[in-house]
Amino acid sequence: GKPFVETFIVSEIRQSVQVVLDRALQAQETTNYHLKFRTKSKQIEHLLVNASARQDANFRNIGVIIVSQDLTDSKRDREMKVMASELRNFVDTANAAIYGVDIHGNVNEWNDKTVELTGFTKEEAFGKNLVPTFILRRFQKSVRETFDKALNGIETSNFELEFLTKSRSLIHVLVSATSRRDADNNVVGVVGVAQDITEAKKT
């Protein structure tokens, strides 16, 4: 017995929803109307609504039938995709070398600054095992230990190592490594951020 619009519809669209209901009572159907609906727990749900007249046995309009489809998850999915796209753009264009490996040590992240720093393209790096492919032999053990710690949730900051670029130049980098987690908070790899300190080492 509660008034539908005042009880369940958010204030900013009550007037337009009332218009939809009035039209339906005059046998003017509305389709694919985007409706924000307040649940009992005060959550806002997004619905796609069709509204049409409800008629009695004599074909008199006695009410409105509303058929709705929940769009809330779809809207959240779109928002998550936008956030993911923004994060991807941030990583790719960051002014720091950002790279990542899976739990097996294979490269699955290699941003533009890492390409610039190392000379290896994303295509050349992706899928390769980072340590034996790109790390000098004398640093391989310590880098593996750093990755193992990150896989166990222990972050390492300001770890210094030398890196041989594609052009066979030796550069000095300062590295931080942390675990990479999925949506369920499971560790799925390691993310590293490297800063080129080659010039600083010369002074």
Image (cartoon, helix red, strand yellow):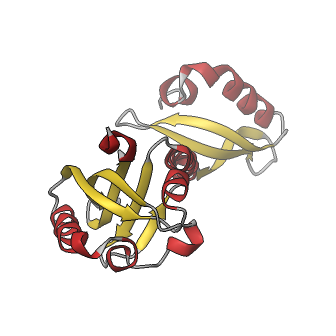
Number of numbered callouts drawn = 0
Q: Depth check: 79 or 71 in front?
A: 79
Residue 8 vs 105, above or below: the answer is above
- Above or below for 168 versus 16: below
Return the residue nearer the eye: 118 or 192: 118
Comparing 79 with 84, the one in front is: 84
Q: Is residue 133 left or right of residue 137?
A: right
Residue at 31%, 72% in the rendered image: 136
Residue pictured at 14% horizontal, 57% vertical: 154
Say above or below: 14 vs 168. above
Vertical relation: 153 (above or below) 35 = below
Front residue of 40 and 119: 119
Q: Residue at x 20, y 61 (%)?
A: 150
Across and down, in percent, residue 54 comes to 72, 45
Give the x, y percent position of residue 35: 62, 37
Quarter of the picture holding the C terminus: top left
Observer able to see residue 181: no
Q: Position of residue 1 (x, y in %)?
A: 48, 32
Snapshot quadrant of residue 120: bottom right
The residue under the point 74% across, 32% down is 20
Residue 119 x/y as whole percent: 54, 62
Q: Is residue 192 visible?
A: yes
For residue 161, side relative to residue 170 (left or right): left
